[in-house]
Amino acid sequence: MPEMTFDVRWPDGRVQRCYSPSLVMHDYLTSGSDYTVADFVDRSATALQEASDRVRAKFGFACTSAAATTEQINSAATQYPGDATIRVVAMHPGLEKTS
């Protein structure tokens, strides 16, 4: 199962690297895009739950790293108003472009 990281710039300029056990994050977030903190928290929680569910389906147990990433995002988000803007700076690996 391919895993990935994604980097988020919080409203104060701090960049946080986040982990996902699945490339499903690409279905919910786009590199270079801005989101409100509230929207980002919702999108990332949904995506990380889906990623954990995929791990459970394949290996028979949930992904504790996905849960830890969700907790790290939720903890960081409490420092900012929900309507503040964050940016997804990068996603690794990225999606391959097709022409």
Image (cartoon, rainbow, N blue to C red):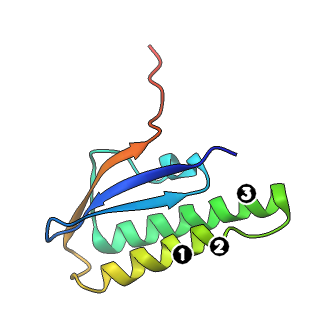
Amino acid bearing label 1: Ala
Q: Is residue 11 above or below residue 35?
A: below
Q: Determine crowd level at label 1: few under 14, some 14-19, many 20+ residues with C-alpha closer than 10 A.
A: some
* Local secondary structure at mark 2: helix
Residue at 49%, 70% (x, y): give it. 69
Q: Is residue 90 above or below residue 9?
A: above
Count of numbered circles on the image = 3
Q: CA distance from mark 1 to mark 3?
A: 16 Å
Q: CA distance from mark 2 to mark 3?
A: 12 Å
Give the quadrant of residue 61.
Answer: bottom right
Q: Which residue is mark 1?
A: 68
Q: Which residue is mark 2?
A: 64
Amino acid bearing label 2: Thr
Q: Determine crowd level at label 3: few under 14, some 14-19, many 20+ residues with C-alpha closer than 10 A.
A: some
Of label 2 and label 3, which has the lower sequence position?
A: 3
Q: Circles 1 and 2: CB distance less than 8 Å?
A: yes
- Residue lying farthest right? 60
Amino acid bearing label 3: Arg
Q: Is residue 62 left or right of residue 13?
A: right
- Residue 86 image position (x, y, % from top left): 24, 63
